[in-house]
Amino acid sequence: GACPGRGKGLGKVIPGRRGMAASSRWIALLLKSSALLLARSSELPAACKDATTCEAYVQNLTARLEEMRDEMRGKHLTLQALEDLRTGILSGKRVELPSAQRQHLERGSPLISEISYDVRHRPISTNLSRHFQHIRTLAADVEVRFHTFMPLKRAASASQKVGPAALVVVVDSEAKLSMHSLDGGVVLDRFDLGHSSGSTITHLALSPSQDNHFVLTADDQGEVRVHNLKVTAKTNSKKEKKDERKEKAGKAEKGDGEKSDDKGEGSAADRHAGSGAQKRQLVVTANLSASFSIPSPAGGEVRKLTAVLPIDRGSQTYFVTGDSLGGIAVFHRNGTMKGRVRVTEDHNGVRGLMRSQGQMVLFWSSHSFGFFSTTQVDVQYPPCTGWNSPLFDVAIDPSFSSSRVILALSDGDVLVFSTSRGKSKACDLTLKFPHVSALPFRLHGFRGHVMGLPTPLEDDKRKNEYLREIFFFNLAAMDAGYGSAPSRAVALQVSFKPRQPEQLALFAAPSGSGGDRTKSQVALRFAGSPGLELYDLSLKTAAPSKAAAAGGSAGGGGDDSWSASNWLNWFPKIGVFGIALVGVVMWNIRKVKNQREQDHDRHSGFDDEFFKERLRERKERDRGGEGRKEDAGGLGGLGGLGGL
């Protein structure tokens, strides 16, 4: 029978036999080297005719022995790496491998990414349950093709009730549109989008404004359809409330035994239903507003729609489309075309469009990216190029106001380009992410991090063999540079094994919102599973990098000095607020105290002078009174005399 540890599988390995096998390999190498030495020594008398030829021959033999020693050392390292991998697989733990060695092995076997870490860029955390809290399953019986979040406008006043922060928009394989609230309710159920029979929806986009909602869908035949969405809130009618009260009364009249068994759970459910009945329910209606197609070229070439993006310019709405021939077209709200221009000669034309700063649109092809003006329907500056592998996805670093563009290449590399140098335009390569996956990434920005989902290419025959994990890259840590110590570039790496995430939608709630609006959600679609899985995502916001704090300058240095900005970034925000509040209070107290002292001094001086003046007047008045009394006494005497 076959011995354990032999054959193709890993099986159970017997240490003694493994040691015998390793010893036999070393013995074979020693015998080979000895045979080579004997063969060379037999040729030594014939080769050595004089001292010069003998010295040259010995030097040549020594060089060959050095080469053989390097080869033996490489074989030994290979055997050691394989032994480490075997140990890791049997123990169920991942093995740390050097970056170059891991990349080389991953090209040959997708299993390497599942059983190993990059020793230099080991993730700080791999705890799934700490950062991803499962909420519920949405559209459980629907085969989802596209999904995204539609943010809702916040309440205008504090008196209005705070509604949900967003709705989940779902387009299924049958070209039907559904919308779900975050608490699992269905606000729009399988609305027919009206695409022609046999077509497949390839693009989904939402309105950029929260004042007027619409959904834009495009199919593989080039047809674009726009539906207006009206979101309203209503309360239950009197009839519905009356029916609910009757239903509660009927439940209360059930048998005592049934009451005793279901009292706790039933009362809790009734309270939940009662509270839900008082809440305002959202209702969404959809109506077709525009339908158009990209024009066919005159030369008979096939022009396919590859990207679509709605944008707002003031009170006007435009639809920007990219096609496989490298053109970008701008359409008005009613579907009429404003203009079209060719922006690239790369294969497959324009691959994607994204909103940029102002009225500019970021476009990219396989080997270039640039900025397109919807006002002038033209490219203002030459596109940026300079990489070999085709471009797969693009994201913008929000901390740099669209001046840094993050590129995900098809070979798994991620590059960062800076598009400004001071006040001038540039295309400078400033950063490269660590290579931790052989698959390209779908990129999303989230709180100072770049969230990457490995996504296999359509023509990859082994795409089902790769483990798809979600990576969170810390931009500030990478801007600080890499040293000899392990980097902190990968802040989080989570796996949903054995499930494989295929598509991801992220809703990052603004930090200033209140209540449930502060929570961020992730909706994942897994391979081979219907519906969507909704998660709460919690991850601490990364501190801004020094380049971002400096105003968007490119690159990251290695200066670790404690400047004032770094100290403030490190210090908790609540501490800064508290110190500022205490300082303002103390300043006001001192200001009031100084004002009182000044007023007291001013009033005190006025009283002294006033009393002195009054005292002088009183003395003078007293003196004048005494004189008048004397004069009056003399006249009285004369009068007496006159009377006599």
Image: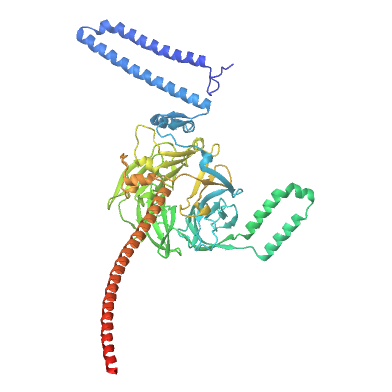
Q: Is residue 621 above or below residue 413?
A: below
In this figure, which colouring scheme has been used for the structure?
rainbow
Which corner quadrant holds the N terminus? top right
Q: Could you tell me which residue is drawn at 40 percent across and 13 percent down?
A: 29
Q: Residue furthest front?
A: 644
Q: Is residue 245 visible?
A: yes
- When asked about the image quadrant of residue 98, the answer is top left
Q: Is residue 232 above or below residue 18?
A: below
Q: Nearer the viewer, residue 607 or 89?
A: 607
Which corner quadrant holds the C terminus? bottom left
Q: Is residue 19 left or right of residue 619?
A: right
Give how far across and how far down residue 163 sits, in percent: 54, 58
Q: Could you tell me which residue is drawn at 68 percent across and 62 percent down?
A: 241
Q: Is residue 324 visible?
A: no
Give how far across and how far down residue 148 sits, in percent: 51, 52
Q: Nearer the viewer, residue 619 or 334?
A: 619
Q: Could you tell me which residue is drawn at 31 percent across and 69 percent down?
A: 607
Q: Nearer the viewer, residue 3 or 578?
A: 578
Q: Is residue 305 left or right of residue 140?
A: left
Q: Nearer the viewer, residue 85 or 135?
A: 135
Q: Is residue 308 left or right of residue 55?
A: right
Q: Is residue 412 left or right of residue 1?
A: left
Q: Could you tell me which residue is drawn at 36 percent across and 42 percent down?
A: 415
Q: Is residue 240 above or below residue 347?
A: below
